[in-house]
Amino acid sequence: EEITYAHRAKLNVVVCSRALINIARGMERKYGIPFVEVSFFGKTEMSKALRSIKNRLNSSNGLDEKTEAIIEEEEKWLEEKLKAYGNLKGKKAVLYTGGVKSWSFISALMDLGIEIVAIGTKKSSLEDEEKMKEILGQDAPLVEDVTPKNLLRLLKDKNADILVAGGRNQYLAVKEGYPFVDVNQERHTAYAGYEGLINLAGQISSGIRFYAEHRSYMSNEAKGTVPDLRTQQGEVVESGLYPRIQEKAARKEIVINPLKHSQSIGAAIAFQGIDKALPIIHGAQGCTFLGKVLLTKHFREPSALASTKLFTENVVMGSEDNLVKTVETVIEKNNPDLIGILTSGLSEVKGDDIAASIKHLNASNDATKVLYVPTSDYEGGLETGYAKAVEAIIGIVHKVSIKPGADQINVLAGSHLTPADFTELREIIESFGLKPIILPDLSALDGSRQGISALSFGGTKIDEIKEMSKSEFTFAIGSSMEASAKRLNERFGVGYRVFESITGLRDTDIFMETLSMLSGRPISEKHARQRRILIDGMRDAHFYYGNKKVCLALEDDLSLQTASWLDEMGVEIEIVDINLGDLFSMEGDFDLLISNSHAEDTAKRLGAPLYQMGFPVYKVLGNNHRITIGYRGTLGLINDIANLIMGSH
């Protein structure tokens, strides 16, 4: 409809001159409508366009003053915003586009302080080339040959920092390790106007930062970043490039929809990874019921978990008898190798002498070992409960006089790993000819178990745990495992290293190099190939991560590991303290929320997509089969989240 009365217009504003200039000239001849040719890319051209439009309208209604006021206001705002991108000054770009974009993007790049070292002119008209020379001078670096081979030569010879071109040249750049910005009309980021220049600066800055930070280790091989194990035992390998950031929320009098889970649930998870074990929560039946429901929903598997089922009279009269009776019944019916007694807030506050009861049980039962794991509800969370359980289990390790096995290592695996991660972890370690004892080992919770049992089965065997003292070295995966690694070191002299993350390119490189150093074997061709594929995938996906803001509401080890690889991808990260924060109070303007399934409503309220991770995850399928570590797992995460971000926009 608007086209039918377009002849009434006072002015035609032509943006893409090569395509529409003839239409504008025809309307000028037929209807007497003047036209002006402008560009809206960059500060200089945008302000020039506004003045050109104002001048051709010949209005006397104060348009001059209004236009100049708007330009002054916008340029002042723009100047302040561009301070964040001062790093772009002096950078060099090769530009290849066509039509008005060819000369208008020159102006936009110059507004950012970027030097144009070559301009492809194959798709430009003679008028476009003349305008390029008006901006850059008669010696403008115009290049007719824009074949891939020549573009690459220009990038190298001119020492360019970035290629600014159409989308079909994207992979020419990224495959060769050059940052790239797509300026074709198919893109989904606006570059026009004053705000568009901020978007362009952000895209260029993000791309240059991504390649600059990772160029040192995005080589064909991981090399030499790991200290000698003989001199650096007990070292903590801090995760990635991301600093230890925690939003220290003030403790609240009340929390609504809390993020944390009880320590007893974390401890119960750890015992699922021990063969023929059973955790027993010493507390009210409802506490155990809730924990069992969450475990079953998360793992989609039957969970081994029992309760002493305390009632009011037990609390008043004493609950030690209940504990002893429950344990004796379990031993009689199921003959477990290991029982873990997990306390609750109820039994902790009451002050029962649980240690004495367990001492009595161990004295009267030789076949079953009973462990005490204090897991009060009023402190810590899932991760600390899991760590306490692992440390308690370490207590059954025996001193072995046999010479340490040259190929046997201990792996203390944190609560942040999925069942599929345990399988991947074992496969990676065994590829170096090493024999890992993984404690605990939750790999059997991937759905491969057969049959039903009241006990956990398929995890680490008690006999394996007892022999951990003769291992050559200990790998602690996650900071929460450091205390257990130290205990092995103090009791048996087994050296250790703590890996805060084994996800992401840098952190996986360090993990692989450590295994190579320990075993004396090189990284397998299989994993070297996975590394090359990861690097290629990172380059493909970094366009969707740059300048995005992501909120993490996860347990500490998982937060740190996730933040590390997200930082590699150029993401701005905010971490919520899971032990103090709640979903109800979460606020902010985020592009993505990463948390457990309980955060679904919060994500909708915030208007951000939710990537479900952590515990519990039960509203999406496949979580237990998802690999999140190593080169392969990192690439899977990168693609999953990039697809989620793209879908939300």
Image (cartoon, rainbow, N blue to C red):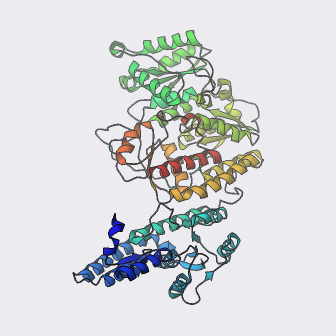
Comparing 461 with 155, the one in front is 155
The residue positioned 51% from the left and 27% from the top of the image is: 268
Left-right relation of 52 to 216: left
- Estimate the x, y position of residue 55 in percent, counting from the top left: 32, 84
Name the residue at the left extreme.
Answer: 61
Left or right side of 493 for 125: left
Q: Is residue 472 visible?
A: no
Can residue 191 be seen by looking at this rendering? yes
Q: Residue furthest bottom?
A: 138
Q: Residue at x 57, y 54 (%)?
A: 240
Left or right, residue 519 beside residue 542: right
Q: On screen, 544 above or below 327?
A: below
Q: Between 290 and 227, which is closer to the camera in this rendering?
A: 290
Q: In the rendering, at what x and y percent does residue 578 appear?
A: 41, 42
Which of the pair 95/437 is nearer the observer?
95
| In the image, residue 151 above or below residue 317 | below
Instruction: Work out which quarter of the rendered image holds the N terminus and state it.
Output: bottom left
Q: Compare residues 639 and 239 and report the one nearer the observer.
A: 639
Residue 597: image x %, image y %?
44, 37
Count of labels in the image = 0
Residue at 42% from the left image edge and 31% from the top image edge: 262
Is 365 above or below relative to 142? above
- Residue 355 horizontal/vertical position (percent): 48, 22
Identify whether 607 is placed above or below 165: above
